Image (spheres, rainbow, N blue to C red):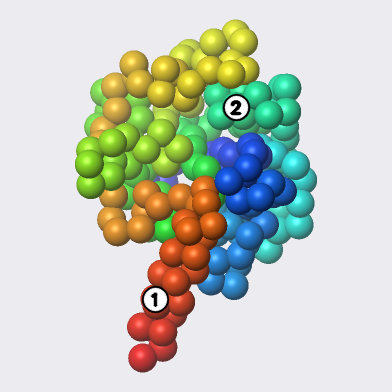
Amino acid sequence: MPERWAAVVLAGGRSSRLGGGDKTRLRVGGRALLDHALAAVAGADPVVAVGPRQPVDGVEPRWTREDPPGGGPVAALAAGLAAVPGACPSVVLLAADQPGVTAATVWRLRAALADAPDAAGALLVDASSRRQWLTGVWRAAALRAALRADPAGAALRAVLGPLPGVEVPARPDETEDVDTPDDLAAARARHEHARQGSAG
């Protein structure tokens, strides 16, 4: 898969169930949630982060904001796509609160799309066959054509759902996001267990 690809990481939104504030700065396995997401898409050129600018480990992404701020994931996707050059044929879309998504996840998604030339995208599906709209790779032209003129408040499923997509079965933990204190505790426990297992 030698072609150039971009990534749009959604790093904004509200975290009311976690007490407010910026949940992408919460740490799992010694690393902020946003840094987990940026590591997963480290091979992209460019990496666009949509949300308030903040310190990151490693290479700085391109920062942008949705219009209006807090306008929802489709507005954030539109803002991210606007920062992606037309020369990038595919775009990984990833939420910044999924520490189980890794570079290997992104590679599987890209490989699935490369093997399906008639598909507009490839996205993870969980054990219940639910599509994970915030974990996928899409042909940039298809995304741009699907976006409505006023994306604020639109549902991501309504925009991406009509596009022909390849479903990629998720591996354990890849579809777990951090929305509540229990989610955060579980994610930290999983990473600690994995660290102890690798150390042993």
Q: Tell me if 165 is positioned left or right of 104 in this view.
A: left
Q: x, y (%) of residue 164?
A: 29, 22
Q: Nearer the viewer, residue 21 or 122?
A: 21
Answer above or below: position of 172 versus 63.
below
The reply to whether residue 38 is visible in this rendering is no
Chain-order first, disc 2 or disc 1:
2
Answer above or below: position of 131 versus 140.
below
Q: Which residue is mark 2?
A: 72
Q: Nearer the viewer, residue 167 or 185?
A: 185
- Callout 1: SS: helix
Q: Amino acid under label 2?
A: Gly
Category of crowding for the residue at label 1, using alpha-carbon neighbours closer than 10 angstroms: few (below 14), some (14–19), many (at least 20): few
Q: Nearer the viewer, residue 67 or 179?
A: 179
Q: Tell me if 148 is positioned left or right of 164 in this view.
A: right
Answer above or below: position of 177 versus 172.
above
Q: x, y (%) of residue 38?
A: 58, 54
Q: Residue at 71%, 22% (x, y): give it.
A: 67
Is there a contact, CB below 8 Å, between mark 2 and mark 1? no
Q: Nearer the viewer, residue 159 or 23?
A: 23
Q: Residue at 69%, 39% (x, y): give it.
A: 51
Q: Amino acid under label 1?
A: Ala
| Count of numbered circles on the image | 2
Query: In terms of image quadrants, where is residue 71?
Result: top right
Q: x, y (%) of residue 39?
A: 54, 58
Q: Residue at 28%, 36% (x, y): give it.
A: 130
Q: Which residue is mark 1?
A: 194
The reply to whether residue 182 is visible in this rendering is yes
Q: Residue at 67%, 57% (x, y): give it.
A: 25
Q: x, y (%) of residue 132?
A: 37, 38
